[in-house]
Amino acid sequence: DYFSVELTENVSLLEAGEVLRDYYPNLLHISVAQSAEQPEGRTLTRRQVSELSPERILEMFMRDICGNEPDDFERRHFREALDAVGKEETHDAG
């Protein structure tokens, strides 16, 4: 049997997946039910995504997947990773 789970509380999907897979190894999908705090229509168009800063994308990802905002440590390492990629792209172009 295969399962798709919809959680009723805003929790970390990664942590929930680890716990649920212990009991349901054929878990296919986990989502969080929409609530009053979480407006419908969270799907973004390509244009909307292109207008977001990398930091905003990180915040949205962390909130959706981990259930919390990134802390200073995560933000700092994210910025360092972006800087490293930028340097590689500059080096490869030159």
Image (cartoon, rainbow, N blue to C red):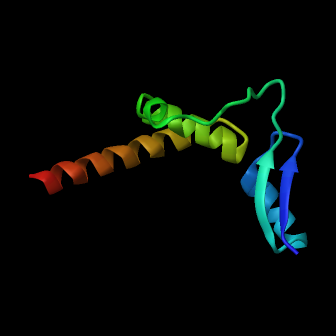
Q: Position of residue 63 (x, y in %)?
A: 67, 38
Query: What residue do we see at 85% from left, 49% from top?
Result: 6
Query: What residue do we see at 63% from left, 42% from top?
Result: 62
Q: Is residue 45 left or right of residue 61?
A: left
* In the image, farthest residue toward the left: 94
Report the quarter where the N terminus lies.
Answer: bottom right
Query: What residue do we see at 32% from left, 44% from top?
Result: 83
The front one of 57 and 5 is: 5
Q: Is residue 1 left or right of residue 42?
A: right
The front one of 82 and 27 is: 27
Vertical comparison of 33 with 35: above or below: below
Q: Is residue 83 left or right of residue 30?
A: left
Q: Position of residue 44 (x, y in %)?
A: 56, 34
Q: Is residue 43 left or right of residue 78?
A: right
The front one of 89 and 41 is: 41
Picture quadrant where residue 50 is located: top left
Q: Evaluate whether residue 59 shows in this view.
A: yes
Q: Position of residue 72 (x, y in %)?
A: 55, 36
The number of discs equals: 0
Q: Position of residue 77 (x, y in %)?
A: 46, 46
Vertical comparison of 82 with 23: above or below: above
Vertical comparison of 86 with 49: above or below: below
Query: What residue do we see at 79% from left, 25% from top?
Result: 37
Q: Evaluate whether residue 71 shows in this view.
A: no
